[in-house]
Image (spheres, rainbow, N blue to C red):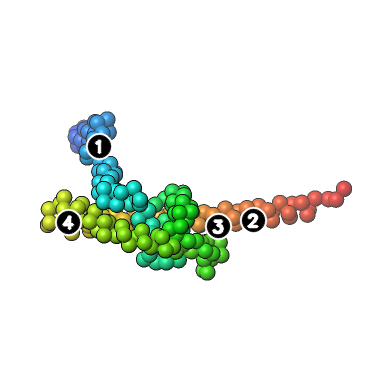
Amino acid sequence: MIEGAAYGAKVRPLWERLMARSMKDDAEADGFRLGASPSHLLHRAEQLAADRFASLVGDTLTLRQFAVLAAIAEAPGLSQSDLVRSTGIDRSTLADMVGRMEKRGWIARTVSPLDARAHAVTLAATGATLLAAATRHARAADAAILDALPRTKRRTFLNILTKLAKFADESAARAEREARRTAKREARAKLAMKKKTKRGDARKPSA
């Protein structure tokens, strides 16, 4: 009994600490603060970047469209899947953007020499002209954002953004590999089921 009481005396403070931490977490969850949310702050920073770019370029070209043109210029012949990875724009949004940009004559799509199921995307003359005209404004927008930070913090800021972008790329690559593995497993399971069904049908006596 003495040992049990001693054990209980040791456990209670730990349990009380855990309960206090849980209550604190609940209080924080109930009082969510946008100003302390990394995802919200990143969104605000993205808005700042887009607004800075728009103030210099006007409504001719958006920051996302510029990113697509710049990515194509860096590596002509990229597929749309490659552009998803290099720009960070989600697949459905990028497909819609590429379709509109092609209609405007900014880019051209041809069958990829590496994969007949994919399209190789290149800059058209109009797109190259737009990119050249907007590049200096993009650099000015970047400079305006960095100017908002102390000079000693700018390199750290860029390093953090680079790490976050790398993490996003790695996460997307893992998800893509897992999706391919899942598709292969499902295809094998369907094939096995089809073979099993055929064997069962073959064993049935004929009428």
Which of pointers 3 and 4 lies earlier in the amino acid sequence? 4
| Mark 3 → mark 1, Cα distance in angstroms | 42 Å
* Three-letter code, disc 1: Leu
**Residue 173: image x %, image y %?**
41, 58
Cβ–Cβ below 8 Å for labels 4 and 1?
no
Looking at marks 3 and 2 on the same chain, the residue that comes earlier in the sequence is marked by: 3
Quarter-wise, where is residue 155 in the image?
bottom left
What residue is pinned by disc 2? 191
Mark 2 or mark 1, which has the lower sequence index?
1
Residue 178 coordinates in the image, percent (x, y): 46, 55
Evaluate if marks 3 and 1 touch, with contact meaning CB atoms under 8 Å apart. Answer: no
Secondary element under disc 4, as helix, strand or loop, is helix
Q: Secondary structure at mark 1?
A: helix
Q: Pointer 3: what residue? A: 184
CA separation in Å, label 4 and label 2: 55 Å
Label 3, label 4: how many angstroms apart (C-alpha)?
45 Å
Task: Name the residue located 36 percent from the left edge and 58 percent from the top edge.
Answer: 130
Does the CB distance between marks 3 and 2 fall below 8 Å? no
Q: Amino acid at mark 4?
A: Arg
Q: Which residue is mark 4?
A: 154
